[in-house]
Image (cartoon, rainbow, N blue to C red):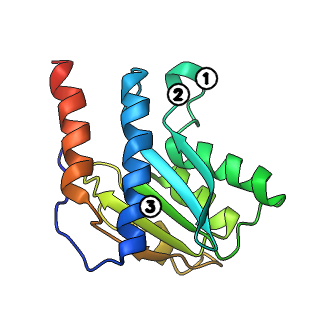
Amino acid sequence: MLFWRAMVESTQADVNFMHTALEEAKAAGARGEVPVGAVIVSDDRIVGRGGNRMILDCDPSAHAEIVALREAAKAIGNYRLLGTTLYVTIEPCAMCAGAMVQARIARLVYGAADLKGGAAGSCFSIFDHPQINHRVEVSRGILAEKAATILQSFFAARR
């Protein structure tokens, strides 16, 4: 797996929330899941969090972002998560990017790029498609090295 490693300018809040997403990723890895973690923030507080749960839940849609979106929607009491930021350790896939558009996420912050399936610019550009009726601001590369290391270590241990 290849991962984009360039760092972009970030705020301290971005770094702090990404550290929380990294903890979610580590917890997913400890459960035997691919270690991806996500948190959703509204007004500087976490309203949703999740790690991959596909194996645990026997659910192919239980990616970290989807788990966090479901939790945030319940916490807020609305499927539209207006004004929120989703932090995730790796660039979202097309399914997760589509779910973010449906949820009206305002901003996506991710760590490592996914050159084989990322849908925020690396492989696909869901958020830039002219037919999409909602725009998501994207910040890339926040703690990318740490996110990539967690994933690489997980897969190296299984080879």
| Residue 88 image point, x, y percent | 43, 55
**Residue name at image x 27 percent, y 66 percent:** 141
**Residue name at image x 52 percent, y 59 percent:** 97
N-terminal label among 3 and 1: 3
Q: Which residue is mark 2?
A: 54
Amino acid marked by disc 1: Asp
Q: Which mark is residue 57?
A: 1
Amino acid marked by disc 2: Met
| Residue 45 image point, x, y percent | 61, 64
Instruction: State yes or no: discs 2 and 1 in contact (Cβ < 8 Å).
Output: yes
**Helix, strand or loop status at disc 2:** helix
**Residue name at image x 42 percent, y 32 percent:** 27
- Distance of label 3 from label 1 (alpha carbons): 25 Å
Q: In this rendering, would 50 be left or right of 14?
A: right
Q: How many marks?
A: 3
Q: Quadrant of the C terminus?
A: top left
Is residue 27 depicted above or below 9 in this figure? above
Q: How packed is label 1: few (under 14 Cα within 10 Å), some, or many (20 or more)?
A: few
Q: Specify the quadrant of the image occupied by residue 140.
A: bottom left
Q: Which residue is mark 3?
A: 17
**Helix, strand or loop status at disc 1:** helix
Q: Nearer the viewer, mark 3 or mark 1?
A: 3
**Helix, strand or loop status at disc 3:** helix
In this view, the residue in front, 26 or 67, is 26
In this view, the residue in front, 125 or 96, is 96
Is residue 12 depicted above or below 159 in this figure? below
Is residue 33 depicted above or below 130 in this figure? above
Q: In this rendering, would 149 be left or right of 136?
A: left
Amino acid marked by disc 3: Phe
